[in-house]
Image (cartoon, helix red, strand yellow):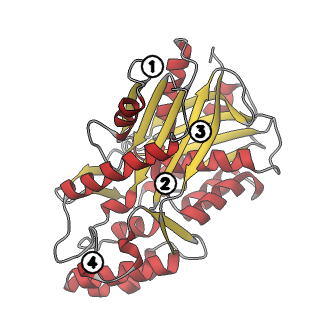
Amino acid sequence: MGNEVFLTAFEIQRPPYSFSQKQGLDWLASIHREADEEGAIVEKRLARVGCKPEDLSRRYVALPDMLHENWEEMSLYNPRKMGGFKERSMFFSQFVEKVFEEFYFLTTTPPDDLIHITCTGYESPSGAQKLVARKGWAKATRVTHAYHMGCLGAIPAIRIGEGFLACGRRQVDLVHTELCSLHLNPFLHEDEQLVAQSLFADGLIKYSLVPKPHTPSLQLLYHHEELIPHTEKEMEWKCEDWGLKMTLSKEIPRKIRGAIQKFVKTLEKRSGRSLEKALYAIHPGGPKIISWIQKQLKLTDRQIRATEQVFYESGNMSSATLPHIWAAILKNEAFSPGELVVGLAFGPGLTISGTVMSKGE
């Protein structure tokens, strides 16, 4: 990598509503029962396959539906008259507009570029474009959409931003708005759906890429991405009439386990740095993914501490998760300047995407 790239100025917005994992599992069991007769048998299966409260404490969401069971008062999740893609998109658009307004409320100096990352809602003009128009930044700020890349979306967005900096741009802002809670379907009772419904949460985060070191910051040293051969059916994220449907194969953990060591060896060789003692920011597809990768790579508890902390406190926030972990590493004084940070994320393809960074002063 020729030009220097630093990640800095991480800013997190907490979605307005939250619930404990136990409350969330109870609510899921209730809405599946309410949806149809088949849903009556979900509770025991959910207890077996769902993410346990000891692994995930709390999830944050954009709408209050998960906080009560008054079905007639639901914004989206009344099983008798559930909203479709149109209603979900409308909610996404209105909510995300407010998110951008809050992130940039006090900002008077426009970024050169603004990259909007999400895989949970698409409206044109986007919240990013509306912000730039309202701020009067139309001639100063370019907007780029990095959409539908799934849980690994942060790394392709950083690649885009790196290219902008290489062309002489001075500040590239990245904003993730992931509203996973909009795409739950209580009429789908398969185990893979219950797993996803028990893991995913909403996440909102903003940060900047700059060509000179800031305090605090992470310096990007290398990035790499590969598709695992013959795995394209294992994970899907497709548009349906009601919303976006996720497909998760039981084979995903095994496929990742089989590829992760070689992938990290490639990161190590091409970056020219030993990663044996590096900190690891691992996208937590679930607690088992974290523990399996820890075993495969022989990582200590300290090396995955930030990953486990973010997942336990906030759940799987799709593409916003990895930036939350990076922010936690920067904030934690137990992690020293100069320590290497490996980022690993997974998405449809199956794709493994990785970064090597260094924690700055």
How far is disc 2 from disc 1 in space, using C-alphas?
28 Å
How far is disc 4 from disc 2 in space, using C-alphas?
24 Å
State the SS at label 3: helix
Label 1 vs 4, first from the N-terminus: 4
Question: At label 4, which amino acid type do we have?
Answer: Glu
Instruction: Say which of marks 4 and 3 sits in front.
Output: 4
Residue that mark 1 sits on:
140
CB of mark 1 within 8 Å of CB of mark 3? no
Left or right, 60 with reference to 296? left
Residue 115's place in the image compared with 168, above or below, is: below
Residue that mark 3 sits on:
262
Residue 185 can be seen in this image: yes
CB of mark 3 within 8 Å of CB of mark 2? no
Residue that mark 4 sits on:
73
State the SS at label 2: strand
CB of mark 2 within 8 Å of CB of mark 1? no
How far is disc 1 from disc 4 in space, using C-alphas?
44 Å
Instruction: Say which of marks 4 and 2 sits in front.
Output: 4
Question: At label 1, which amino acid type do we have?
Answer: Ala
Label 2 vs 1, first from the N-terminus: 1
Instruction: Say which of marks 3 and 2 sits in front.
Output: 2
Residue 338's place in the image compared with 80, above or below, is: above
Q: Residue at x 40, y 64 (%)?
A: 196
Q: Residue at x 72, y 44 (%)?
A: 330
Instruction: Say which of marks 2 and 1 sits in front.
Output: 1
Residue that mark 2 sits on:
203
